[in-house]
Image (cartoon, grey):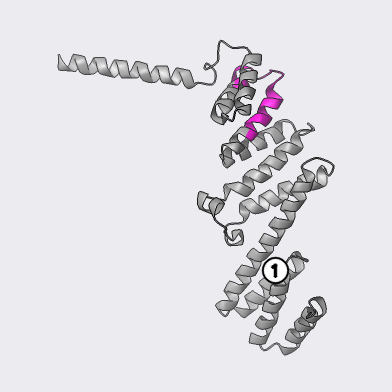
Amino acid sequence: MRWQKLLGSVVILGMLLAGCAATTDPADIYKGESSEQIFKKGEKALRKGEYKEAIKRLEALEVQYPYSIHIELAELHIIYAYYMSEDYPSAQSAAERYIHAWPANPHVVYAYYMRALAYYHQNLGLFEKLFPVDLSRRDLAPMRQAWTDFATVAQEFPDSEYAPAARQYMIYLRNMMAQHELNVAIFYFDHRAYVTAANRATDVIRHYEGAPAVKSALQLLAKSYRALHATDSEKEVLRVIRYNYPSP
Protein backbone atom coordinates (compact mmCIF):
# COMPACT_ATOMS: atom_id res chain seq x y z
CA MET A 1 0.00 0.00 0.00
CA ARG A 2 2.88 2.35 0.71
CA TRP A 3 4.03 2.24 -2.90
CA GLN A 4 0.50 3.07 -4.03
CA LYS A 5 0.40 6.15 -1.76
CA LEU A 6 3.86 7.16 -2.99
CA LEU A 7 2.80 6.74 -6.61
CA GLY A 8 -0.31 8.80 -5.96
CA SER A 9 1.79 11.59 -4.46
CA VAL A 10 4.10 11.57 -7.48
CA VAL A 11 1.13 11.79 -9.85
CA ILE A 12 -0.40 14.68 -7.88
CA LEU A 13 2.95 16.49 -7.79
CA GLY A 14 3.33 16.01 -11.53
CA MET A 15 -0.13 17.44 -12.13
CA LEU A 16 0.67 20.45 -9.95
CA LEU A 17 3.93 21.08 -11.78
CA ALA A 18 2.19 20.72 -15.12
CA GLY A 19 -0.45 23.19 -13.97
CA CYS A 20 2.22 25.67 -12.94
CA ALA A 21 3.98 25.29 -16.26
CA ALA A 22 0.75 25.87 -18.10
CA THR A 23 0.09 29.11 -16.27
CA THR A 24 3.52 30.56 -17.03
CA ASP A 25 3.78 29.65 -20.73
CA PRO A 26 3.62 32.96 -22.66
CA ALA A 27 1.66 31.22 -25.39
CA ASP A 28 -1.15 30.23 -23.02
CA ILE A 29 -1.10 32.56 -20.03
CA TYR A 30 -3.55 35.12 -21.52
CA LYS A 31 -5.07 32.88 -24.14
CA GLY A 32 -8.61 34.11 -23.54
CA GLU A 33 -7.72 37.77 -24.04
CA SER A 34 -7.44 39.76 -27.25
CA SER A 35 -4.23 41.53 -28.26
CA GLU A 36 -5.87 44.82 -27.29
CA GLN A 37 -6.71 43.55 -23.81
CA ILE A 38 -3.25 42.14 -23.16
CA PHE A 39 -1.58 45.33 -24.35
CA LYS A 40 -3.82 47.73 -22.45
CA LYS A 41 -3.46 45.77 -19.22
CA GLY A 42 0.29 45.64 -19.75
CA GLU A 43 0.39 49.41 -20.16
CA LYS A 44 -1.73 49.83 -17.04
CA ALA A 45 0.69 47.65 -15.05
CA LEU A 46 3.56 49.74 -16.40
CA ARG A 47 1.95 52.99 -15.27
CA LYS A 48 1.36 51.51 -11.81
CA GLY A 49 4.99 50.46 -11.50
CA GLU A 50 4.12 46.76 -11.63
CA TYR A 51 7.00 46.02 -13.94
CA LYS A 52 7.06 42.23 -13.67
CA GLU A 53 3.38 42.01 -14.57
CA ALA A 54 3.92 44.45 -17.42
CA ILE A 55 6.81 42.39 -18.78
CA LYS A 56 4.81 39.19 -18.50
CA ARG A 57 1.89 40.63 -20.43
CA LEU A 58 3.88 42.44 -23.10
CA GLU A 59 6.11 39.45 -23.77
CA ALA A 60 3.03 37.24 -23.95
CA LEU A 61 1.64 39.63 -26.55
CA GLU A 62 4.75 39.09 -28.69
CA VAL A 63 4.22 35.34 -28.58
CA GLN A 64 0.43 35.15 -28.91
CA TYR A 65 -0.08 38.02 -31.37
CA PRO A 66 3.23 38.55 -33.21
CA TYR A 67 1.51 40.63 -35.93
CA SER A 68 -0.46 42.86 -33.56
CA ILE A 69 -0.45 46.58 -34.27
CA HIS A 70 0.77 47.03 -30.69
CA ILE A 71 3.99 45.01 -31.04
CA GLU A 72 6.34 47.89 -31.83
CA LEU A 73 5.19 49.95 -28.83
CA ALA A 74 5.08 46.87 -26.62
CA GLU A 75 8.75 46.22 -27.34
CA LEU A 76 9.61 49.76 -26.27
CA HIS A 77 7.63 49.27 -23.07
CA ILE A 78 9.51 46.03 -22.38
CA ILE A 79 12.85 47.88 -22.56
CA TYR A 80 11.60 50.43 -20.04
CA ALA A 81 10.08 47.82 -17.73
CA TYR A 82 13.30 45.81 -17.55
CA TYR A 83 15.31 48.99 -16.98
CA MET A 84 13.04 50.13 -14.16
CA SER A 85 13.24 46.63 -12.66
CA GLU A 86 17.05 47.11 -12.62
CA ASP A 87 17.41 44.04 -14.83
CA TYR A 88 19.94 45.82 -17.00
CA PRO A 89 21.16 42.83 -19.08
CA SER A 90 17.55 42.10 -20.08
CA ALA A 91 16.94 45.79 -20.85
CA GLN A 92 20.05 45.76 -23.02
CA SER A 93 18.89 42.63 -24.86
CA ALA A 94 15.39 44.06 -25.35
CA ALA A 95 16.87 47.25 -26.78
CA GLU A 96 19.07 45.26 -29.15
CA ARG A 97 16.06 43.30 -30.38
CA TYR A 98 14.20 46.53 -31.08
CA ILE A 99 17.18 48.07 -32.93
CA HIS A 100 17.47 45.01 -35.16
CA ALA A 101 13.72 44.73 -35.75
CA TRP A 102 12.93 48.43 -36.27
CA PRO A 103 16.14 50.14 -37.49
CA ALA A 104 14.29 52.82 -39.48
CA ASN A 105 11.61 53.58 -36.90
CA PRO A 106 11.86 57.09 -35.40
CA HIS A 107 11.62 55.53 -31.93
CA VAL A 108 14.88 53.63 -32.45
CA VAL A 109 16.72 56.56 -30.84
CA TYR A 110 14.99 55.63 -27.58
CA ALA A 111 16.27 52.06 -27.89
CA TYR A 112 19.84 53.29 -28.41
CA TYR A 113 19.54 55.65 -25.45
CA MET A 114 18.12 52.97 -23.14
CA ARG A 115 20.72 50.44 -24.25
CA ALA A 116 23.40 52.99 -23.38
CA LEU A 117 21.88 53.47 -19.92
CA ALA A 118 21.64 49.70 -19.45
CA TYR A 119 25.33 49.27 -20.30
CA TYR A 120 26.19 52.15 -18.00
CA HIS A 121 24.29 50.77 -15.02
CA GLN A 122 24.85 47.03 -15.39
CA ASN A 123 28.42 47.34 -14.14
CA LEU A 124 27.21 48.95 -10.90
CA GLY A 125 26.33 46.85 -7.89
CA LEU A 126 24.17 47.88 -4.94
CA PHE A 127 27.19 49.12 -2.97
CA GLU A 128 28.26 51.42 -5.81
CA LYS A 129 24.75 52.87 -6.07
CA LEU A 130 24.67 53.75 -2.39
CA PHE A 131 28.20 55.05 -1.97
CA PRO A 132 30.59 57.06 -4.15
CA VAL A 133 32.95 54.82 -6.15
CA ASP A 134 35.70 55.53 -8.67
CA LEU A 135 34.30 53.90 -11.80
CA SER A 136 37.59 54.48 -13.61
CA ARG A 137 38.97 51.52 -11.66
CA ARG A 138 36.27 49.14 -12.89
CA ASP A 139 36.06 47.06 -16.07
CA LEU A 140 35.34 49.69 -18.71
CA ALA A 141 34.05 47.43 -21.51
CA PRO A 142 30.36 48.17 -20.74
CA MET A 143 31.21 51.85 -20.34
CA ARG A 144 32.86 51.98 -23.76
CA GLN A 145 29.77 50.41 -25.29
CA ALA A 146 27.61 52.93 -23.42
CA TRP A 147 29.72 55.77 -24.85
CA THR A 148 29.28 54.35 -28.37
CA ASP A 149 25.49 54.23 -28.00
CA PHE A 150 25.33 57.72 -26.48
CA ALA A 151 27.44 58.92 -29.42
CA THR A 152 24.95 57.33 -31.83
CA VAL A 153 22.14 59.23 -30.15
CA ALA A 154 24.03 62.55 -30.15
CA GLN A 155 25.39 62.30 -33.69
CA GLU A 156 22.66 60.51 -35.63
CA PHE A 157 19.70 62.03 -33.76
CA PRO A 158 21.02 65.47 -32.74
CA ASP A 159 17.56 67.03 -32.51
CA SER A 160 16.03 64.28 -30.38
CA GLU A 161 14.99 64.89 -26.80
CA TYR A 162 17.65 62.39 -25.67
CA ALA A 163 20.61 64.09 -27.39
CA PRO A 164 21.43 66.69 -24.66
CA ALA A 165 21.63 64.05 -21.93
CA ALA A 166 23.58 61.74 -24.24
CA ARG A 167 26.20 64.45 -24.78
CA GLN A 168 26.59 64.95 -21.03
CA TYR A 169 27.05 61.23 -20.52
CA MET A 170 29.65 61.19 -23.29
CA ILE A 171 31.70 63.88 -21.57
CA TYR A 172 31.51 62.08 -18.23
CA LEU A 173 32.41 58.68 -19.71
CA ARG A 174 35.24 60.15 -21.78
CA ASN A 175 36.75 61.75 -18.69
CA MET A 176 36.35 58.51 -16.79
CA MET A 177 38.05 56.49 -19.53
CA ALA A 178 40.91 58.99 -19.56
CA GLN A 179 41.30 58.58 -15.80
CA HIS A 180 41.25 54.81 -16.23
CA GLU A 181 44.13 54.98 -18.72
CA LEU A 182 46.00 57.30 -16.35
CA ASN A 183 45.51 54.82 -13.50
CA VAL A 184 47.11 52.15 -15.67
CA ALA A 185 50.05 54.43 -16.47
CA ILE A 186 50.52 55.18 -12.75
CA PHE A 187 50.50 51.45 -12.01
CA TYR A 188 53.35 50.87 -14.46
CA PHE A 189 55.29 53.86 -13.12
CA ASP A 190 54.95 52.61 -9.55
CA HIS A 191 56.33 49.26 -10.71
CA ARG A 192 59.28 51.02 -12.41
CA ALA A 193 58.13 50.13 -15.91
CA TYR A 194 58.90 53.66 -17.03
CA VAL A 195 58.79 53.10 -20.80
CA THR A 196 55.33 51.54 -20.59
CA ALA A 197 54.21 54.26 -18.19
CA ALA A 198 55.38 56.92 -20.64
CA ASN A 199 53.57 55.22 -23.52
CA ARG A 200 50.30 54.94 -21.57
CA ALA A 201 50.53 58.55 -20.42
CA THR A 202 51.10 59.61 -24.03
CA ASP A 203 47.94 57.72 -25.05
CA VAL A 204 45.93 59.75 -22.54
CA ILE A 205 47.35 63.00 -23.91
CA ARG A 206 46.70 62.05 -27.54
CA HIS A 207 43.25 60.51 -27.27
CA TYR A 208 41.58 62.47 -24.47
CA GLU A 209 42.45 66.09 -25.17
CA GLY A 210 40.64 68.39 -22.76
CA ALA A 211 39.97 65.71 -20.13
CA PRO A 212 41.02 66.58 -16.54
CA ALA A 213 43.38 63.59 -16.53
CA VAL A 214 45.56 65.10 -19.28
CA LYS A 215 47.44 67.43 -16.92
CA SER A 216 48.32 64.54 -14.59
CA ALA A 217 49.28 62.45 -17.63
CA LEU A 218 51.73 65.16 -18.73
CA GLN A 219 53.22 65.32 -15.24
CA LEU A 220 53.58 61.54 -15.16
CA LEU A 221 55.18 61.61 -18.61
CA ALA A 222 57.76 64.13 -17.37
CA LYS A 223 58.49 61.96 -14.32
CA SER A 224 58.87 58.89 -16.54
CA TYR A 225 61.35 60.70 -18.80
CA ARG A 226 63.26 61.85 -15.72
CA ALA A 227 63.43 58.26 -14.46
CA LEU A 228 64.70 57.21 -17.90
CA HIS A 229 67.27 60.07 -17.89
CA ALA A 230 65.70 61.45 -21.06
CA THR A 231 66.46 65.04 -20.09
CA ASP A 232 65.55 66.75 -23.38
CA SER A 233 62.17 64.96 -23.56
CA GLU A 234 61.46 65.85 -19.93
CA LYS A 235 62.19 69.54 -20.60
CA GLU A 236 59.89 69.54 -23.62
CA VAL A 237 57.02 68.06 -21.60
CA LEU A 238 57.58 70.55 -18.77
CA ARG A 239 57.45 73.36 -21.34
CA VAL A 240 54.08 72.04 -22.60
CA ILE A 241 52.77 71.91 -19.02
CA ARG A 242 53.83 75.50 -18.30
CA TYR A 243 52.25 76.73 -21.54
CA ASN A 244 48.91 74.93 -21.12
CA TYR A 245 48.62 75.09 -17.34
CA PRO A 246 50.24 78.36 -16.23
CA SER A 247 50.49 78.96 -12.51
CA PRO A 248 47.89 81.45 -11.18
Q: At 73% across and 47% down in the image, what residue appears? A: 150
Quadrant including the N terminus? top left
Q: At 71% across and 42% down in the image, what residue appears? A: 113
Residue linked to disc 1: 213
- Confirm whether the magenta stretch covers residue 69: yes
**Residue 95, percent from left and from top:** 66, 36
User: To which quarter of the image does residue 197 belong?
Assistant: bottom right
- Confirm whether the magenta stretch covers residue 191: no
Left or right of 40? Residue 52 is: left
The one of 248 and 218 positioned closer to us in this rendering: 248
**Residue 32, percent from left and from top:** 56, 10
Q: Above or below — where is 68 with respect to 208? A: above
Q: At 66% across and 65% down in the image, what residue appears? A: 179
Quadrant including the C terminus? bottom right
Q: At 71% across and 31% down in the image, what residue appears? A: 101
Q: Above or below — where is 196 with respect to 3? A: below
Q: From where the camera sits, is residue 193 visible?
A: yes
How crowded pointer 1 is (Cα within 10 Å; few <14, some 14-19, many 20+) is rated as many
Q: In the orientation shown, which residue stands out farthest toward the left?
A: 1
Q: Amino acid at mark 1?
A: Ala
Q: In the orientation shown, which residue stands out farthest toward the right?
A: 159
Q: How many badges with numbers are in the image?
A: 1
User: To which quarter of the image does residue 136 belong?
Assistant: bottom right
User: To which quarter of the image does residue 98 belong?
Assistant: top right
Give the structural element (helix, strand or loop) at label 1: helix
Q: From where the camera sits, is residue 228 visible?
A: no
What is the magenta segment's predominant secondary structure? helix
**Residue 186, percent from left and from top:** 61, 73
Q: Above or below — where is 213 with respect to 34? A: below
**Residue 151, percent from left and from top:** 76, 49
Left or right of 189? Residue 25 is: left
> Which contiguous range is marked in magenta?
61-80
